[in-house]
Amino acid sequence: MSHKILVVSHTAFRRVGRTVYIELLNKGYDITIIHPQTLEAADGSIMQHEKKSNDEPLLIALHQTIRNPRIHTYKGLIKKVNEINPQIIILENDPISYLALQLGFLGKNK
């Protein structure tokens, strides 16, 4: 049985950002991805996430609390992490971001 892996990634908003995780899924890893529901572009327009294809891991789209990637988190994140109960969390974000600290402390308390 493979480890249960949770990925938290703003780049997984698009399929191209999920490519490496599709490969891991094909190799038998149990993967869930949390990504933003929407992203605000530099010009202020709102982009919707790309929907899941049949060959992709489970995707969970959550709303970001604010736009700033250094201090944002996701609404309902802790509840989802506790539901998934992953052995491994992969975070694609700034290593000193609020999200990194939040997930680090959450993992330490398990």
Image (cartoon, rainbow, N blue to C red):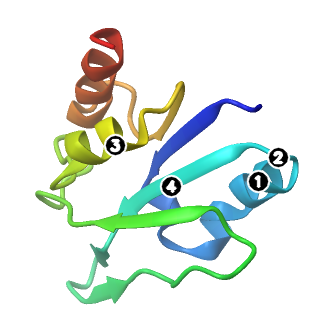
Tell me if residue 83 comes above or below residue 86 in the rendering. below
In three-dimensional space, the C-alpha distance between marks 1 and 2, rounded to whole angstroms, equals 5 Å
Amino acid type assigned to the residue bearing label 1 in the image: Leu
What residue sits 18% from the left and 48% below the top? 72
Q: Is residue 11 left or right of residue 28?
A: left
What residue sits 63% from the left and 74% below the top? 15
Q: Which residue is mark 1?
A: 25
What residue sits 74% from the left and 32% below the top? 2
Q: Which residue is mark 4?
A: 33
Q: Is residue 35 left or right of residue 25?
A: left
Q: Which residue is mark 3?
A: 83
| C-beta proximity under 8 Å, tags 4 and 3 | no
Q: Which residue is mark 2?
A: 28
In three-dimensional space, the C-alpha distance between marks 4 and 1, rounded to whole angstroms, equals 11 Å
Circle 1 sits in a helix, a strand or a loop, which is it? helix
| C-beta proximity under 8 Å, tags 1 and 2 | yes
In three-dimensional space, the C-alpha distance between marks 3 and 2, rounded to whole angstroms, equals 21 Å
Tell me if residue 35 comes above or below residue 9 in the rendering. below
Q: Position of residue 105 (x, y in %)?
A: 25, 16
Amino acid type assigned to the residue bearing label 4 in the image: Ile
Label 4 or label 2, whichever comes before in sequence order: 2
Q: Is residue 6 left or right of residue 98?
A: right
Q: Position of residue 47 (x, y in %)?
A: 34, 86
Q: Is residue 47 left or right of residue 7?
A: left
